[in-house]
Amino acid sequence: MNRKTWNQDLLREAGRRFRLAGHFTGGEPYGSGHINDTFAVTYDQGGTRVRYIFQRLNSRVFRDPEGLMDNVARVCRHTAAKVERDAPPGDVNRRALTMVEAGDGKPFWVDDAGDYWRAYFFIEHASTHDVITSPAQAREAARAFGRFQSMLADFPADSLRETIPDFHHTRKRVEALRRAVGEDRGGRAKDAGPELEFALSREELAGILLDLHAAGEMPARVTHNDTKLNNVMLDNATGEGVCVIDLDTVMPGLSLYDFGDMVRTAVSPAAEDERDLAKVAVRPEFFEALAGGFLSSAGSVLRPVEREHLVTAGKLLTYENGIRFLTDYLLGDVYFRVKRPGHNLDRCRTQFALLRELERRENELGRMVKDIPAG
Ligand code: ADP
Ligand code: GN1
Ligand code: MG
């Protein structure tokens, strides 16, 4: 857990470096992301309170912050240009993530400690949800992620830096787990026997999409790669998916990685770190809504082989996150932000319980996909 300190002076100082109008009135930590340090910061602009999001990048996770910021800035511009075509002019900054430039024209500021900061317009009248409560939310979120993918269909994929190499190479994630068990630096492997056994018993799942891609059957596209449901903002009044956020991992990937992580984070009523595993369940109507929403906006470009693996994708991303949490637990919680001892092991257990449920209901979910008309 590599948490850094912050105070109002640091936020005020960061704010001075960006082209922001008005007076800084204060800021506070915001949201429940596991990676970056996010703050909601308020400015008084002639009597009107205006909020911005400031983020300090996690330098342990992102090793090429300038490459990453260049990716994000270009993706923001690309999506804004698409959104401008049909959004009301005043709403473009809500429908496309919008960065504030630093005084030197760069999309970031580097503080004295060497940390990278960025500022975004705050997307008001919309919220992210760690757990969603209705199929309508699932449909809207999936539609927004599908739309995001289709907006990037003409983005030059080769120009994107790979911000985290092999991010969804699940086989390599399994190898990393094996290494972590072998080293067992923190002496924690003894507490995770059943989880390790489960992880290795499902290893075959890791290669299914990788093999289809290697065989040329499943294409790489420009994808978001971190489509957990709290990375999309839903409008507070209409429920519409207004804007996809958290663009640090936009890079070439498989379309199904994006669908799979939505399944992982939307089908269960339980939180990602729920300790009562009896609460972990698959809500088929939420799966159906996700598939319907995603296919409505991204379906027209998907090949039949992608459509056929929508359920597999949900299992895969649930498995992948389970082994990532387990690996981080064994390594001593160096990657994901944790709030209590054993937090990463709890998250792993929840993922594996969900994977069991997805396996149990796999045929039912597969039939639902068949019933959805082609996009
Ligand atoms: P992390 O990589 O740590 O997950 P995110 O970019 O997802 O960071 O931001 C964390 C949280 O901050 C989001 O889940 C969301 O609630 C909030 N957030 C991020 N960007 C914005 C924005 N532009 N407007 C409003 N809220 C935002
Ligand atoms: C992280 O950044 P955030 O909190 O939206 C992680 C995802 C994991 C997710 C698990 C860059 O997402 O890959 O699936 O936690 N992001 C990165 O909750 O590793
Ligand atoms: Mg996030």
Image (cartoon, grey):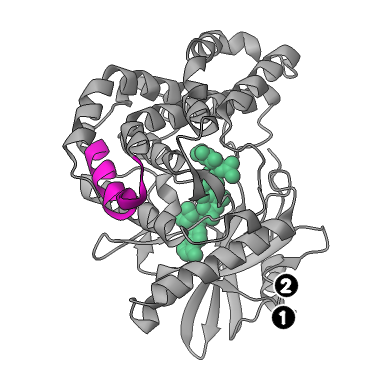
Q: Is residue 39 above or below residue 312?
A: below
Q: Position of residue 301 (x, y in %)?
A: 36, 50
Q: Secondary structure at mark 2?
A: helix
The vertical placement of 371 against 352, above or below, is below
> From this viewpoint, which residue is outermost toward the front?
216
State left or right for residue 296 relative to residue 181.
left
Q: Could you say which quadrant of the image residue 284 lies in?
A: top left
Residue in the picture at 30% in, 35% down: 267
Residue 356 is situated, as x and y percent measured from the top left of the image, at 36, 18
Amino acid on which disc 1 is placed: Gly
Q: Mark 1: few, some, or many residues within 10 Å (few <14, many ≥20)?
A: some
Q: CA distance from mark 1 to mark 2?
A: 12 Å
- Identify residue for label 2: 13
Residue at the (38%, 28%) spot, across then down: 312
Pointer 1 residue Cβ closer than 8 Å to ligand 1: no
Circle 2: residue type: Glu
Taking 368 as reference, is 102 above or below it? below
Q: Quadrant of the N terminus?
A: top right
Q: Do the residues under discs 1 and 2 have CB atoms within 8 angstroms?
A: no
The front one of 123 and 374 is 374
Q: Is residue 302 magenta?
A: yes
Q: Provide the residue span drawn in magenta.
A: 286-303
Q: Is mark 2 within 8 Å of ligand 1?
A: no
Badge 2, how many Cα within 10 Å: few under 14, some, many 20+?
few
Q: Residue 217: x and y, percent? A: 45, 34
86 to the left or right of 320: left
Judge whether residue 348 can be spotted in this image. Answer: no
Can you identify the residue that label 1 sits on? Answer: 103
Comparing marks 1 and 2, which lies closer to the viewer? 1
Image quarter of residue 373: top left
